[in-house]
Amino acid sequence: MGAIWERGYVHVYTGNGKGKTTAAIGLAVRAAGAGLRVFIGQFVKGKPYSEVAALQRFSDCITLRQFGRGCFIRSGPGSEDIRNAAVGLEEVRNVITGGQYELVILDEVNVAVQLGLFPVERLLELIDAKPDRVELVLTGREANPAVVQRADVVTDMGEVKHYYRQGILAREGIEC
């Protein structure tokens, strides 16, 4: 079908509240329903979260790739994590400029920058490389101010109340 707009925008979903990935996946499903092709690149994440299984059902119009191992959040990234992120950035650059996808979502990319998997300048280069026909969504806590400045739409999902504070762990199908 192809893009139905003249210009694609850059969205940032950030903040300490719940729902950044969920919002991006909702947008992916909406875009797929409109006949658009979607690419989701997940940085940091490498485990088979429930969204991975769900999105496999849409594999004819949504492609999902994970570029992380998801096992360093408490200990900091290692050289393999940095390599995975570099491979992911190169693949994403090809996706953004390749013309195959109208919507590209970089899930947890803000966290990847914040954790030092790659410098913010590399992410800004991806934003600058985006053709007009591509809509780009960047998710993750602690979005770098330079990324926020460059974006067209920024949503800060703030936590007002969360049951994590009462010791309730992530539940499959709801948080993971």
Image (cartoon, rainbow, N blue to C red):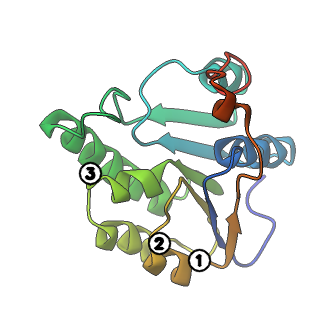
Q: Nearer the viewer, mark 2 or mark 3?
A: 3
Closer to the chain start, of discs 1 and 2, is 2
Q: Position of residue 83 (x, y in %)?
A: 19, 41
Closer to the chain start, of discs 2 and 3, is 3
Q: Nearer the viewer, mark 1 or mark 2?
A: 1
Residue 59 seen in render: no
Looking at the image, residue 121 sits to the left or right of residue 141; the answer is left
- The residue carrying mark 3 is 117
Looking at the image, residue 89 sits to the left or right of residue 56; the answer is left
Name the amino acid, label 2: Ile
- The residue carrying mark 2 is 127
Q: Assess whether mark 2 and mark 1 are in contact (beta carbons under 8 angstroms).
A: yes
Residue at 49 percent across and 61 percent down: it is: 142
Closer to the chain start, of discs 1 and 3, is 3
Name the amino acid, label 3: Leu
Q: Residues within 10 Å of mark 2 (few under 14, many from 20)?
A: many
Q: Position of residue 172 (x, y in %)?
A: 67, 15
Element type where label 3 sits in the image: loop
Q: CA distance from mark 2 to mark 3?
A: 17 Å
Q: Where is 139 relative to 74, above or below?
A: below
Residue at 74 percent across and 47 percent down: it is: 23
